[in-house]
Amino acid sequence: MNTFKPNWASPPGATVLDLLHERQLPVKELAERAHRDVQSVSRLIYGLEPLTIDWAECLSAMLGASPGFWLRREEMYRADLRRIFESTEEPPDKWLSDVPINDLVRFGWIKQGTSVNETTLNACAFFGVTTSRSFDQKYKSLYQASAYRASTAYVTRPTAVAAWLRQGEIQASAVVCAPWNRNKLAGSLDSIRALTLEADPSTFLPQLESTLASCGVAMVVARTPEGCRASGATRFLHSEQALIQLSFRYLADDQFWFTVFHEIGHLLLHAHNELFLEGLEDRSNEAEREADDFALDTLFAKVGASALDKVEPSLLGIKRLARRAGISDGIVVGQLQKRKRVPYSHFNKLKARYAWSD
Protein backbone atom coordinates (compact mmCIF):
# COMPACT_ATOMS: atom_id res chain seq x y z
CA MET A 1 0.00 0.00 0.00
CA ASN A 2 1.45 3.39 -1.03
CA THR A 3 1.64 6.10 1.59
CA PHE A 4 0.65 9.57 0.44
CA LYS A 5 3.62 11.92 0.81
CA PRO A 6 2.74 15.42 -0.36
CA ASN A 7 5.40 17.87 -1.56
CA TRP A 8 4.15 20.49 0.86
CA ALA A 9 4.24 20.95 4.62
CA SER A 10 1.60 22.56 6.81
CA PRO A 11 2.79 24.25 10.02
CA PRO A 12 0.84 23.64 13.22
CA GLY A 13 0.04 27.33 13.13
CA ALA A 14 -2.34 26.62 10.27
CA THR A 15 -4.38 24.43 12.61
CA VAL A 16 -4.20 27.13 15.28
CA LEU A 17 -5.51 29.71 12.82
CA ASP A 18 -8.35 27.41 11.69
CA LEU A 19 -9.46 26.87 15.28
CA LEU A 20 -9.27 30.58 16.09
CA HIS A 21 -11.46 31.37 13.08
CA GLU A 22 -13.89 28.55 13.93
CA ARG A 23 -14.34 29.91 17.44
CA GLN A 24 -14.21 33.55 16.34
CA LEU A 25 -11.28 34.27 18.62
CA PRO A 26 -8.87 37.06 17.65
CA VAL A 27 -5.14 36.43 17.50
CA LYS A 28 -4.74 39.17 20.10
CA GLU A 29 -6.70 37.13 22.67
CA LEU A 30 -4.42 34.12 22.14
CA ALA A 31 -1.41 36.39 22.62
CA GLU A 32 -2.80 37.81 25.85
CA ARG A 33 -3.64 34.40 27.30
CA ALA A 34 -0.24 33.04 26.27
CA HIS A 35 1.51 36.10 27.74
CA ARG A 36 3.17 36.70 24.38
CA ASP A 37 3.06 39.61 21.97
CA VAL A 38 0.97 39.42 18.81
CA GLN A 39 4.10 39.24 16.66
CA SER A 40 5.13 36.03 18.44
CA VAL A 41 1.74 34.46 17.73
CA SER A 42 1.99 35.56 14.11
CA ARG A 43 5.40 33.90 13.77
CA LEU A 44 4.01 30.70 15.31
CA ILE A 45 1.12 30.69 12.84
CA TYR A 46 3.50 31.04 9.90
CA GLY A 47 5.83 28.30 11.18
CA LEU A 48 8.67 30.69 11.96
CA GLU A 49 8.58 30.18 15.73
CA PRO A 50 8.86 26.59 16.95
CA LEU A 51 5.94 25.19 18.89
CA THR A 52 7.52 24.54 22.29
CA ILE A 53 6.18 22.73 25.34
CA ASP A 54 4.99 26.06 26.77
CA TRP A 55 3.11 26.78 23.57
CA ALA A 56 1.66 23.26 23.50
CA GLU A 57 0.28 23.59 27.02
CA CYS A 58 -1.20 27.00 26.25
CA LEU A 59 -2.84 25.82 23.02
CA SER A 60 -4.21 22.74 24.76
CA ALA A 61 -5.83 24.89 27.45
CA MET A 62 -7.27 27.41 25.00
CA LEU A 63 -8.06 25.42 21.85
CA GLY A 64 -8.29 21.83 23.06
CA ALA A 65 -6.38 18.62 22.20
CA SER A 66 -3.53 17.46 24.38
CA PRO A 67 -0.12 19.11 24.62
CA GLY A 68 1.23 15.94 23.04
CA PHE A 69 -0.98 16.49 19.99
CA TRP A 70 0.46 19.94 19.43
CA LEU A 71 4.04 18.75 19.92
CA ARG A 72 3.49 15.87 17.46
CA ARG A 73 2.00 18.36 15.01
CA GLU A 74 5.19 20.42 15.25
CA GLU A 75 7.37 17.33 14.89
CA MET A 76 5.47 16.20 11.79
CA TYR A 77 5.82 19.63 10.20
CA ARG A 78 9.58 19.73 10.67
CA ALA A 79 9.87 16.11 9.48
CA ASP A 80 7.87 16.93 6.35
CA LEU A 81 10.19 19.84 5.60
CA ARG A 82 13.24 17.60 5.97
CA ARG A 83 11.70 14.86 3.81
CA ILE A 84 10.89 17.29 1.03
CA PHE A 85 14.39 18.71 1.18
CA GLU A 86 15.91 15.25 0.79
CA SER A 87 13.53 13.78 -1.77
CA THR A 88 12.62 16.52 -4.23
CA GLU A 89 14.23 16.58 -7.67
CA GLU A 90 15.03 20.26 -7.21
CA PRO A 91 16.03 20.71 -3.56
CA PRO A 92 15.18 24.02 -1.89
CA ASP A 93 18.82 25.03 -1.51
CA LYS A 94 19.00 25.26 -5.31
CA TRP A 95 15.96 27.43 -6.05
CA LEU A 96 16.48 29.50 -2.91
CA SER A 97 20.13 30.14 -3.77
CA ASP A 98 19.35 33.65 -5.04
CA VAL A 99 17.43 34.63 -1.89
CA PRO A 100 19.53 36.86 0.43
CA ILE A 101 19.44 34.30 3.25
CA ASN A 102 22.12 36.06 5.30
CA ASP A 103 20.02 39.21 5.48
CA LEU A 104 16.93 37.22 6.44
CA VAL A 105 18.92 35.78 9.36
CA ARG A 106 20.49 39.15 10.24
CA PHE A 107 17.12 40.89 10.32
CA GLY A 108 15.65 38.13 12.51
CA TRP A 109 13.14 37.05 9.87
CA ILE A 110 14.40 33.45 10.05
CA LYS A 111 16.60 31.60 12.51
CA GLN A 112 20.13 30.49 11.70
CA GLY A 113 20.08 26.69 11.69
CA THR A 114 22.78 24.37 12.98
CA SER A 115 23.42 23.42 9.36
CA VAL A 116 22.94 24.96 5.91
CA ASN A 117 20.07 22.55 5.29
CA GLU A 118 18.27 23.59 8.46
CA THR A 119 18.64 27.28 7.59
CA THR A 120 17.25 26.56 4.13
CA LEU A 121 14.29 24.75 5.70
CA ASN A 122 13.69 27.79 7.89
CA ALA A 123 13.62 29.88 4.71
CA CYS A 124 11.00 27.51 3.25
CA ALA A 125 8.92 28.03 6.39
CA PHE A 126 9.32 31.79 6.01
CA PHE A 127 7.98 31.77 2.45
CA GLY A 128 5.39 29.07 3.20
CA VAL A 129 6.47 27.06 0.16
CA THR A 130 8.59 23.97 -0.44
CA THR A 131 8.99 23.81 -4.24
CA SER A 132 10.34 26.17 -6.88
CA ARG A 133 7.02 26.02 -8.71
CA SER A 134 5.03 27.10 -5.65
CA PHE A 135 7.58 29.84 -4.94
CA ASP A 136 7.30 31.19 -8.48
CA GLN A 137 3.51 31.05 -8.43
CA LYS A 138 3.22 32.75 -5.05
CA TYR A 139 5.96 35.35 -5.07
CA LYS A 140 7.60 35.89 -8.42
CA SER A 141 4.20 36.36 -10.00
CA LEU A 142 3.43 38.96 -7.32
CA TYR A 143 6.61 40.86 -8.13
CA GLN A 144 6.13 40.51 -11.88
CA ALA A 145 2.67 42.01 -11.56
CA SER A 146 4.43 45.34 -11.15
CA ALA A 147 7.55 44.55 -13.19
CA TYR A 148 6.39 46.73 -16.08
CA ARG A 149 7.34 49.66 -13.88
CA ALA A 150 10.83 48.35 -13.17
CA SER A 151 13.69 50.68 -13.95
CA THR A 152 16.64 49.40 -15.96
CA ALA A 153 18.96 51.77 -14.11
CA TYR A 154 19.41 49.46 -11.11
CA VAL A 155 19.84 45.74 -10.60
CA THR A 156 16.90 44.27 -8.70
CA ARG A 157 16.67 40.68 -7.51
CA PRO A 158 13.08 39.45 -7.66
CA THR A 159 13.77 36.97 -4.85
CA ALA A 160 14.94 39.81 -2.58
CA VAL A 161 11.79 41.79 -3.38
CA ALA A 162 9.74 38.64 -2.72
CA ALA A 163 11.39 38.23 0.69
CA TRP A 164 10.65 41.85 1.61
CA LEU A 165 7.02 41.54 0.51
CA ARG A 166 6.64 38.29 2.46
CA GLN A 167 7.94 39.94 5.62
CA GLY A 168 5.33 42.63 5.09
CA GLU A 169 2.58 40.01 4.99
CA ILE A 170 3.83 38.38 8.18
CA GLN A 171 4.11 41.67 10.07
CA ALA A 172 0.71 42.82 8.80
CA SER A 173 -0.94 39.71 10.23
CA ALA A 174 -0.12 41.04 13.69
CA VAL A 175 -1.81 44.40 13.11
CA VAL A 176 -5.37 44.66 14.39
CA CYS A 177 -7.31 46.65 11.80
CA ALA A 178 -10.82 47.96 11.39
CA PRO A 179 -12.46 47.15 8.03
CA TRP A 180 -11.25 49.19 5.06
CA ASN A 181 -12.83 52.64 5.07
CA ARG A 182 -11.84 54.94 2.22
CA ASN A 183 -13.70 57.97 3.56
CA LYS A 184 -12.10 57.68 6.98
CA LEU A 185 -8.64 57.49 5.41
CA ALA A 186 -9.34 60.58 3.31
CA GLY A 187 -10.54 62.35 6.45
CA SER A 188 -7.35 61.45 8.36
CA LEU A 189 -4.92 63.23 6.04
CA ASP A 190 -4.65 66.35 8.20
CA SER A 191 -3.82 64.40 11.35
CA ILE A 192 -1.27 62.29 9.47
CA ARG A 193 0.35 65.41 8.01
CA ALA A 194 0.70 66.86 11.52
CA LEU A 195 2.85 63.85 12.48
CA THR A 196 5.60 65.12 10.16
CA LEU A 197 6.44 67.70 12.84
CA GLU A 198 7.51 64.91 15.21
CA ALA A 199 11.14 63.90 14.61
CA ASP A 200 11.25 60.74 16.76
CA PRO A 201 10.02 57.55 15.01
CA SER A 202 9.28 55.94 18.37
CA THR A 203 6.66 58.66 18.83
CA PHE A 204 5.19 59.12 15.35
CA LEU A 205 5.23 55.52 14.11
CA PRO A 206 2.77 54.14 16.73
CA GLN A 207 0.44 57.07 16.07
CA LEU A 208 0.67 56.59 12.31
CA GLU A 209 0.05 52.86 12.66
CA SER A 210 -2.97 53.45 14.90
CA THR A 211 -4.51 56.05 12.60
CA LEU A 212 -4.09 53.89 9.50
CA ALA A 213 -5.34 50.75 11.28
CA SER A 214 -8.54 52.58 12.19
CA CYS A 215 -9.06 53.06 8.43
CA GLY A 216 -8.43 49.41 7.55
CA VAL A 217 -4.77 49.84 6.58
CA ALA A 218 -2.00 47.79 8.18
CA MET A 219 1.21 49.79 8.15
CA VAL A 220 4.48 47.90 8.62
CA VAL A 221 8.14 48.90 8.48
CA ALA A 222 10.70 46.38 7.25
CA ARG A 223 14.29 46.80 6.17
CA THR A 224 15.13 45.80 2.62
CA PRO A 225 17.52 42.91 2.02
CA GLU A 226 20.34 43.16 -0.50
CA GLY A 227 18.94 43.35 -4.03
CA CYS A 228 15.71 45.09 -3.04
CA ARG A 229 15.69 48.87 -3.45
CA ALA A 230 12.04 49.36 -2.55
CA SER A 231 11.12 52.37 -0.44
CA GLY A 232 7.45 51.46 -0.15
CA ALA A 233 4.71 49.15 -1.35
CA THR A 234 0.92 49.22 -1.35
CA ARG A 235 -1.57 46.42 -1.95
CA PHE A 236 -4.78 44.95 -0.61
CA LEU A 237 -4.33 41.71 1.33
CA HIS A 238 -8.07 41.14 1.03
CA SER A 239 -11.17 43.25 0.44
CA GLU A 240 -11.26 44.55 4.03
CA GLN A 241 -7.57 45.20 4.64
CA ALA A 242 -4.92 47.18 2.82
CA LEU A 243 -1.19 47.10 3.47
CA ILE A 244 1.30 49.95 3.35
CA GLN A 245 4.84 48.66 3.69
CA LEU A 246 7.71 51.10 4.28
CA SER A 247 11.46 50.57 4.35
CA PHE A 248 12.94 53.88 5.58
CA ARG A 249 15.32 53.33 2.69
CA TYR A 250 16.68 56.90 2.65
CA LEU A 251 16.69 57.37 6.44
CA ALA A 252 15.46 60.97 6.17
CA ASP A 253 12.11 62.56 6.96
CA ASP A 254 11.53 64.19 3.55
CA GLN A 255 11.70 60.88 1.67
CA PHE A 256 9.85 58.92 4.34
CA TRP A 257 6.81 61.21 4.56
CA PHE A 258 6.59 61.71 0.81
CA THR A 259 6.49 57.91 0.47
CA VAL A 260 3.76 57.64 3.14
CA PHE A 261 1.48 60.05 1.30
CA HIS A 262 2.39 58.54 -2.06
CA GLU A 263 1.22 55.12 -0.82
CA ILE A 264 -1.96 56.62 0.62
CA GLY A 265 -2.52 58.16 -2.81
CA HIS A 266 -2.44 54.73 -4.40
CA LEU A 267 -5.07 53.49 -1.94
CA LEU A 268 -7.39 56.42 -2.59
CA LEU A 269 -6.87 56.77 -6.34
CA HIS A 270 -6.10 53.41 -7.89
CA ALA A 271 -7.33 49.86 -8.39
CA HIS A 272 -7.25 47.58 -5.37
CA ASN A 273 -6.09 44.51 -7.29
CA GLU A 274 -2.64 45.92 -8.04
CA LEU A 275 0.69 45.91 -6.27
CA PHE A 276 2.50 49.25 -6.28
CA LEU A 277 6.23 49.18 -5.59
CA GLU A 278 8.19 52.38 -5.04
CA GLY A 279 11.92 52.67 -5.61
CA LEU A 280 12.05 50.10 -8.41
CA GLU A 281 9.78 51.67 -10.97
CA ASP A 282 9.98 54.03 -13.87
CA ARG A 283 8.25 57.07 -12.42
CA SER A 284 6.92 58.11 -15.81
CA ASN A 285 4.13 55.59 -15.21
CA GLU A 286 0.78 57.41 -14.99
CA ALA A 287 -0.26 55.87 -11.66
CA GLU A 288 3.08 56.84 -10.12
CA ARG A 289 2.75 60.41 -11.38
CA GLU A 290 -0.74 60.63 -9.93
CA ALA A 291 0.44 59.31 -6.56
CA ASP A 292 3.36 61.77 -6.60
CA ASP A 293 0.98 64.66 -7.31
CA PHE A 294 -1.35 63.50 -4.55
CA ALA A 295 1.53 63.36 -2.04
CA LEU A 296 2.75 66.82 -2.97
CA ASP A 297 -0.70 68.41 -2.94
CA THR A 298 -1.58 66.81 0.39
CA LEU A 299 1.66 67.77 2.12
CA PHE A 300 1.28 71.39 0.96
CA ALA A 301 -2.52 71.53 1.19
CA LYS A 302 -2.47 74.57 3.48
CA VAL A 303 -0.40 76.75 1.15
CA GLY A 304 -0.54 75.10 -2.27
CA ALA A 305 2.36 73.34 -3.97
CA SER A 306 3.02 76.49 -6.02
CA ALA A 307 4.46 78.04 -2.85
CA LEU A 308 7.60 76.00 -3.51
CA ASP A 309 8.22 78.04 -6.65
CA LYS A 310 7.78 81.36 -4.85
CA VAL A 311 9.57 80.87 -1.55
CA GLU A 312 12.97 82.45 -1.04
CA PRO A 313 15.44 79.52 -0.97
CA SER A 314 17.02 80.59 2.30
CA LEU A 315 17.02 79.27 5.86
CA LEU A 316 14.40 81.79 6.92
CA GLY A 317 12.28 81.23 3.81
CA ILE A 318 12.29 77.46 4.29
CA LYS A 319 11.33 77.68 7.96
CA ARG A 320 8.54 80.15 7.29
CA LEU A 321 7.04 78.00 4.53
CA ALA A 322 7.26 74.86 6.66
CA ARG A 323 5.47 76.62 9.52
CA ARG A 324 2.71 77.89 7.22
CA ALA A 325 2.28 74.46 5.65
CA GLY A 326 2.29 72.69 9.03
CA ILE A 327 5.02 70.27 8.02
CA SER A 328 8.66 69.63 8.89
CA ASP A 329 11.47 71.81 7.54
CA GLY A 330 13.04 68.72 5.96
CA ILE A 331 10.08 68.10 3.67
CA VAL A 332 10.35 71.65 2.29
CA VAL A 333 14.10 71.20 1.77
CA GLY A 334 13.58 67.90 -0.06
CA GLN A 335 11.04 69.41 -2.45
CA LEU A 336 13.20 72.47 -3.15
CA GLN A 337 16.12 70.15 -3.90
CA LYS A 338 13.92 68.09 -6.21
CA ARG A 339 12.95 71.28 -8.06
CA LYS A 340 16.64 72.24 -8.21
CA ARG A 341 15.89 75.49 -6.45
CA VAL A 342 18.61 74.58 -3.97
CA PRO A 343 21.56 72.20 -4.45
CA TYR A 344 21.28 68.71 -2.93
CA SER A 345 24.20 69.59 -0.66
CA HIS A 346 22.41 72.56 0.95
CA PHE A 347 20.16 72.72 4.06
CA ASN A 348 20.38 68.97 4.76
CA LYS A 349 20.82 69.70 8.47
CA LEU A 350 17.16 70.69 8.47
CA LYS A 351 16.15 67.11 7.68
CA ALA A 352 15.42 64.66 10.48
CA ARG A 353 17.73 61.66 10.13
CA TYR A 354 17.00 58.10 11.23
CA ALA A 355 19.13 55.04 11.95
CA TRP A 356 18.33 51.36 12.31
CA SER A 357 18.89 49.85 15.74
CA ASP A 358 20.49 46.44 15.28
Image (cartoon, rainbow, N blue to C red):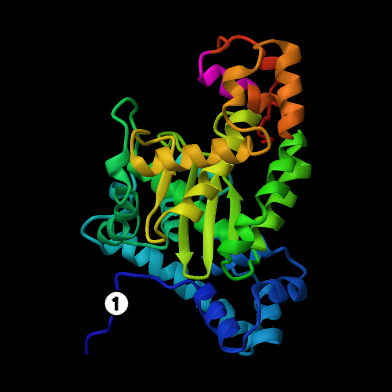
Tell which of 92 and 342 is nearer to you: 342
Residue type beneath disc 1: Lys
Q: Determine the residue positioned at 33% across, 29% down.
A: 155
Quadrant of the image occupied by residue 320: top right
Q: Position of residue 31 (x, y in %)?
A: 71, 71
Q: Position of residue 107 (x, y in %)?
A: 57, 42
Residue 22: in sight, yes or no?
A: yes
Residue 103: in sight, yes or no?
A: no
- Residue 37 horizontal side relative to residue 172, left or right: right
255 relative to 195, above or below: above
87 relative to 99, above or below: below
Q: Position of residue 75 (x, y in %)?
A: 50, 73
Q: Determine the residue positioned at 50% across, 55% down.
A: 268
Q: Determine the residue positioned at 53% across, 66% down.
A: 241
Q: Which residue is mark 1?
A: 5
Image quadrant containing the C terminus: top right
- The residue carrying pointer 1 sits among few (fewer than 14), some (14 to 19) or many (20 or more) residues within 10 Å by Cα, namely few
- Based on the picture, tell me whether residue 154 belongs to the magenta stretch: no
Tally of numbered tags: 1
Tell which of 47 and 289 is nearer to you: 289
Quadrant of the image occupied by residue 29: bottom right
Q: Which residues are magenta?
A: 333-340
| SS for callout 1 | loop
Image quadrant containing the N terminus: bottom left
Q: Determine the residue positioned at 58% across, 57% down.
A: 171
Q: Position of residue 46 (x, y in %)?
A: 52, 65
- Based on the picture, tell me whether residue 335 belongs to the magenta stretch: yes
17 relative to 293, above or below: below
